[in-house]
Image (tube, rainbow, N blue to C red):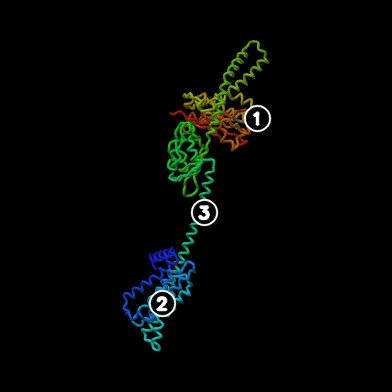
Amino acid sequence: MTVSDQLLVRRAARLLQELGPRSRVVLSQLPLVLALTVVFTLGPASSEVRLRPGFLLGLLLQLVLAVLCFAVPWWRLGENAPLAIPIVDFVSLWFLRNGGGAEVTGLGSLAAFPVIWIAASTLASGWALVLCAVGPLAIVLPTLLDALPSPSPSEWTIFVSLPLIMLATAVAIRIAGAGLRVQERQLRAAQGHLHRLLERAEESERLLTGILDTAEIGIVAVSPDRAAARCNRRFRQMLDDAGVPSEGTPASLDRLPLRERDGRTPVPPDRQPIARAAAGEHIDGEVVWLGPAGRARALSVRARPLDGDGGGAVLAFGDVTQLLEDVEAKTDLVRTVAHEFRTPLTAVLGHLDLALEAPDLPAGLGRRIGLAQAGAERLLRIASDLLTSSAELLPLVPSRVDVGQVVRERAESALPAAARADIAIDLDVDQPLPARADPFRVGQAVDNLLSNAIKYSPSGGTVTLSARAEDGWITIGVADTGMGIRPEDRPMVFERFFRSDDARRAHIPGVGLGLAITKTIAERHGGELACVSTPGAGSTFTFRIPAAAG
Ligand code: ADP
């Protein structure tokens, strides 16, 4: 059987399966009824033949079978009950063939119809083949019996060939049917497997959507081409909160109205977090503003590429608007307090200066005024640090300077403090080191790094201060042999007001602003501040700014 034949048979079988039991029985009997009608309408049998009792009985049986096909409630009976019809068909054909006499020929071959019906049924193969052989054999048996005791070769041929052909037909149908049944079973098993997989996938999908939608952070998953994107309910809510239409979200996800952390600079499409994440970039806690001013929300973004061949990435957005507002309010308060401190402190220092200049000042009182002055100066420095600890309040007055010279001067002014702490300062400074920079701010940065190196080193230590020009940069290095910084503290040391537990526990004075200011100074010059440290062995801070061109 060719593939197209198999498909045809399978389609016919499926069609039969879809029909009701009665329609199946009627359709199975119909070919024989039609064949008989054709034979009797066109056939040569005379009216005399048609009136013979055997022949009439055969016809009557066909009539009864036709009525039974319609009348019997086959759906209530067993699966093989309709096979009674083809079996009785054999009987009917027996009467038609043998009751009509010699004029009626070829009716035996109509046994092919009940044979096909039985062979294609679900009856056990043994029984089906016995029926398919015995039925036709019985139909042609009278021919042989009539010819006995000496049947001619043609009579033998009739007797043997019809049952044999019918049996062969039944075997062929059975084999084809078995193949079809195996394929059907495999198909059904595969369908069942697919169905179970689909159910499991749908269940996982429901679970995942449930988890994502209960999360308090906005989550977005994107494919590498950004064509397919999915986001959870919280992210859509974030878009709504910021007044960004959340409908049609996937297509517009990489063109969100985003601004940088400063709240002003728009983020261009190719720098938007979703575009960068889809390109495989890791993002760690970057802050962007989403939405128009007035309704904008501050979002902290993290992104990780997805493992596997498919690529793509997942982004998590946390709403940090309240946090930033709180920090801003705290910074404002600190700035206001610091500002209010400065004026009276300047007045106190002025008066203490005047008092120190008074003639005949008793020595003890002069020493006390000196101590008060040192304390007031320290307070004034802290107030200034608090005020300058944000980039906007750190104005630069750049000029062409020799950074080597600035570094040497600051090292010299740190010598008394170093001597008091029993720390040696090693200088390794090249000169000249020309740069376009603000000498006051660069000096302030060196002061901060040097005072930390001295503060956080035990007595007897050494601070190495170096400065050199390398690859278009001027690099100032401050290395100490002090307590060092734990790895978990290192990312935070440049944050405003951060102080390590080690520093607090050792009662080393400080407010946690020096490194933040130093970093701002480096960045305002287009440079950077970096740190490497080994706890218990020491730290090295590297301050870099661009060297002057030419
Ligand atoms: P402060 O020194 O006033 O606390 P900084 O901003 O200068 O503030 O430093 C922040 C923190 O970084 C310090 O509290 C200290 O824990 C750590 N740190 C800075 N410099 C050093 C250093 N040279 N050695 C060890 N720890 C340091």
Residue 84 horizontal/vertical position (percent): 46, 73
Q: Using the image, determine if residue 13 lies above or below residue 356.
A: below
Q: Residue tagged by mark 3?
A: 200
Residue lying furthest bottom in this view? Answer: 149
Residue 101 in view, yes or no: yes
Amino acid bearing label 2: Ser
Q: In the image, what residue type sits under mark 1?
A: His
Q: Position of residue 317 (x, y in %)?
A: 51, 39
The amino acid beneath tag 3 is Arg
Residues at discs 2 and 3 in contact (Cβ within 8 Å): no
Name the residue beneath numbered marker 1: 507
Residue 419 or residue 455, whichever sits in front: 455
* Rendering quarter of residue 159: bottom left
Q: CA distance from mark 2 to mark 3?
A: 56 Å
The residue located at (65%, 15%) in the rendering is 366
The residue at the point 50 percent across, 55 percent down is 197
Marks 1 and 3, the one that precedes in the sequence: 3
**Residue that numbered label 2 is attached to:** 92
* Mark 1 neighbour class, 10 Å CA radius: few under 14, some 14 to 19, many 20 or more: few
> Nearest the camera: 478 or 387?
387
Q: Position of residue 538 (x, y in %)?
A: 60, 34
